[in-house]
Amino acid sequence: MKFFILIAFIAFAAADSYEAPKYEAPKYEAPKYEEVTYAPQPYSFGYDVQDKESYTDFEHNEKSDYNVVTGSYRVVLPDSRVQIVTYKADANGYTADVKYEGEAKYPEYVEPQSKADASYSAPSYKAPEYKQPAYVAPAYTAPFYKEPEYKTPAYPTPSYKTPAYTTPSYPTPAYPTPAYKAQAYNAPAVYP
């Protein structure tokens, strides 16, 4: 018993001196992004597209050393002229030289015929002939329900036997006759 009292006293003392831990909010530093710059690399490319079905025809070429980019592109315009652009880009800026080859061709304008023209006659349409649809009424037969036949259940009549009770026979108990002993009788004393 003394042990439990000692433990309770120690627990009380420990709880009295307990202080909740203090937490500081985490400090996040903003990520530092450094711009990555790459040294200019020399390159050269070119491609050409000619598709007669879609009337697409153009070409592009470009090359660069470390400091100067030069190139040209050629495209066939819808008016059948060819536009050729030659360009140069360096530390002084972008300069382009634009030239055109060929002569612009436009389709000849044809004025549409007026509806007021006397030779015009309105089309005549014969009204379509529709036959009256013939619907055959569906033949429904009345549903036939067979009356259920319920048979009276046949339960066999239970047969109970009359229980046979036997009258119990109790023998008359035989008690032994008590034997009395004669006691000596002393007459009372008579006083005068």
Image (tube, rainbow, N blue to C red):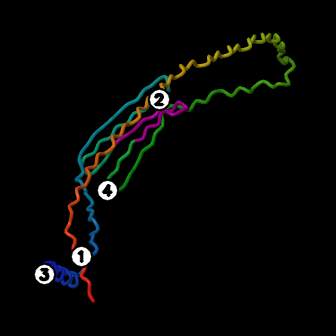
Question: What residue sits 35% from the left and 47% below the top?
Answer: 88
Of labels 3 and 2, earlier in sequence is 3
Q: Residues within 10 Å of mark 4 (few under 14, many from 20)?
A: few
Q: Do the residues labelled 3 and 2 touch (CB within 8 Å)?
A: no
Work out which quarter of the rendered image holds the N terminus and state it.
bottom left
**Residue 136 % position (x, y):** 78, 10
> Which label sits on residue 187?
1
- In the image, 92: left or right of 153? left
> Which label sits on residue 91?
4
Outermost residue, bottom side: 192
Please identify the dominant SS of the magenta region.
strand
Of labels 4 and 1, earlier in sequence is 4
| Residue 79 shown in magenta | yes
| Residue 2 shown in magenta | no
Q: How far apart are marks 1 and 3 (CA)?
A: 81 Å
Question: What residue sits 20% from the left and 61% below the top?
Answer: 181
- In the image, 168: left or right of 132? left
Q: How far apart are marks 3 and 2 (CA)?
A: 104 Å
Question: What residue sits 41% from the left and 47% below the top?
Answer: 96
Q: Mark 3 falls on what kind of element?
A: helix
Q: Are marks 4 and 3 in contact (CB under 8 Å)?
A: no
Q: Distance between the residues labelled 2 and 1?
A: 169 Å
Which segment did they paint magenta?
71-85
According to the picture, the residue beneath numbered tag 3 turns out to be 2
